[in-house]
Image (cartoon, coloured by chain):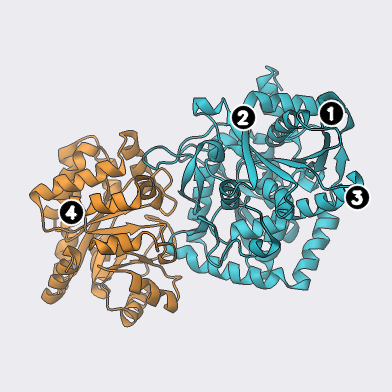
Amino acid sequence: MSRIEGVLKSLKAQGRKALIPYITAGDPHPDQTVDLMHTLVAAGADIIELGVPFSDPMADGPVIQQACERALVHGTSLRQVVGMVKTFREKDDKTPIVLMGYLNPMEAMGYEQFANTAKAAGIDGILTVDLPPEEADEVAPLFTERDLDAIFLLAPTTTDDRIRSISEHCSGYVYYVSFKGVTGSGKIDIDEVAAKVAHIHELTALPVGVGFGIRDAETAAAVGRVSDGVIVGSVLVDTIARNQADPEQLKQALTDLLHPMRVALDNLTS
Amino acid sequence: MKLTEEMLSGFPDARGHFGAYGGRFVSETLFDSLMTLEKEYKRLKNDPDFQAAFDKDLAHYVGRPSPLYLAERLTRETGGAQIWLKREDLNHTGAHKVNNTIGQALLASFLGKKRIIAETGAGQHGVATATVCARLGLECHVFMGAEDVQRQSLNVYRMKLLGATVHSVQGGTKTLKDAMNDAMRDWVANVDDTFYIIGTVAGPHPYPLLVRDFQSVIGRETRQQSLHQAGKLPDALVACVGGGSNAIGMFYPFLTDESVQLYGVEAGGLGIETGKHAAPLSAGRPGVLHGNRTYLMEDENGQIAGTHSVSAGLDYPGVGPEHSWLKDIGRAHYVSVTDDEALDGFRKLTRVEGIMPALETAHAVAYAIKLAATMDKDQVVVINVSGRGDKDMQTIAKIDGIEM
């Protein structure tokens, strides 16, 4: 059983929902990323999605685009991001780490080498925003062979046939993009998400994480009520941007934002 | 590799692949739209009503066929092969871009989409899109890098006059690739009512296929005209390559004619060795950007590199996937000329023939002059004059130190 599957199964057994924060590696500085990952875990993260900065993040809004730019100013490379996870693992061998990014940096490193180093560093899953299963013939088997979960996206526009076929290619969890738009752009419609997630649950046994549009404890709880996990990205990255001048204040601000979401999610069960 | 009609019919394959290139590398939200577009295009491609509407627009709105013109003085001065010019600069709006925008705007209308988005570098595609939107009464949004907005203020003004909203893109390198990123972001957010008119043979399947089909009218006409006027097929075709739509439009109908040499001319900028250029086929490697796998300019970590060209329309770090495939199988040759050589080409064609080419086209002119000089007098070189140079007057005046 992969670390992701283990965590999600255990949460389900407890009737709890997964809290999955996203930050961009190297933002605001590569030296801070590992520390920030531990901060997220202390504040209640069950799984961390760690963004690999890319020069052309087409599916992301300005908040994450600027995070990529801040990280790239310091030369943050995929190799370094993998190294960060390795360092993180020295103190934490429980929290699953999902690398989230675009295909080209992986292609540039070479898929086999990437899969090997990712596995060796203790990475658990890979989510490639611009890689649909149709194009993943070459890449996905390399992940599967190494017990790395390949996580794919579902969107409001995904047809039933594709939900079924994408789920077959997917392991760990499926990531449901809650609205049509880029990260950080829109307002989530809870009723619509609830209906769609319920429908996805009919078509696949995989846990469903919902991302895009979750900004506070209230939306986290509303989404947690209908899904297996909530993914929180832009609002955290925005908090990093606003507090980048002071590393200690930054950690406090992230905690202040994430911890109430944890509490709200856990209150759903009581 | 010798290409046959039968082989060509297999490219792109069902998933939009040209060999190792092409494909559909997009976020999930767009996938269904691309599948619908592919399905509808396949249907309409063989629909007589759609084709008749397209042909009618090309004839009466664009002004086709465009002439194939023997540049006698340029030929004499060069002292080699006959140099002929395929005059896409004479199309309505002044470039080949309009062939494609007419086709895609018709597609949008058949699909019932009322809102159009487009990206543009030099502005020619933006102007062509704004033009067809004005004619069809469609809402038009054009994304353009902030640096290009400055370089091409004349075209920005033209687009605004035509009723388009021009979005100045501040992210990244503020050029064409960033405009394409922002156009894709807009598309994801408005996928239900919006049609994205991509300006070149790049992007996710089926765009490289349908843009190539719409631009192939250039090569089909050239083929007929050359047989009729020169009495033979051309020996060489020369076209500039940014994304590569004018080049593929010119090349495609000749791919199975083994005797016809194909030359795509990339922007060598300050020189390939300086790294300041926009020549992915000459000095890049395969990667994935903007929905397709193709040759790219990137650093060792897979980050997309900044580009440089005197011509905003060539200032793109990628290229259409079909060109990547033609390069690998050796069917087309990809070369580059520098900014300075292109400017010489511009001046030469202007002074000797009274035709001011776009700076993009000037790259093809510069290479064709070198090429023709090495060929025999009875041979025929055709340059695709992809656009006229009016839009580049400010750039050239600035280089010449003239205030306008």
Point out the frontmost of discs 1 and 2: 1
Q: Residue at x 69, y 59 (%)?
A: B213
Report the residue that reaches farthest toward the left.
A91
In this rendering, is residue B37 above or below A94?
A: below
Q: Which mark is residue B74?
A: 1
Q: Earlier in the sequence, mark 1 or mark 3?
A: 1
Please give left or right for residue B381 compared with residue A167 in the image. right
Judging by colour alone, the chain drawn in orange in this rendered image is A
Q: Nearer the viewer, mark 3 or mark 4?
A: 3
Residues marked 4 and 1, same chain: no
* Residue at the image point whose x is 10% and y is 55% from the top: A93
Q: Chain of mark 4?
A: A
Chain B appears what colour?
cyan
Q: Residues under labels 4 and 1: Cα distance? A: 65 Å
Say the numbered circle drawn on residue A122: 4
Left/right placement of residue A12 relative to residue A235 reads left
Residue at disc 4, secondary structure: loop
Instruction: Give the spatial CA distance, label 2 vs label 4.
Output: 47 Å
Q: Are marks 3 and 2 on the same chain?
A: yes
Q: Label 2, on which residue?
A: B310
Q: Position of residue A208 (x, y in %)?
A: 28, 71
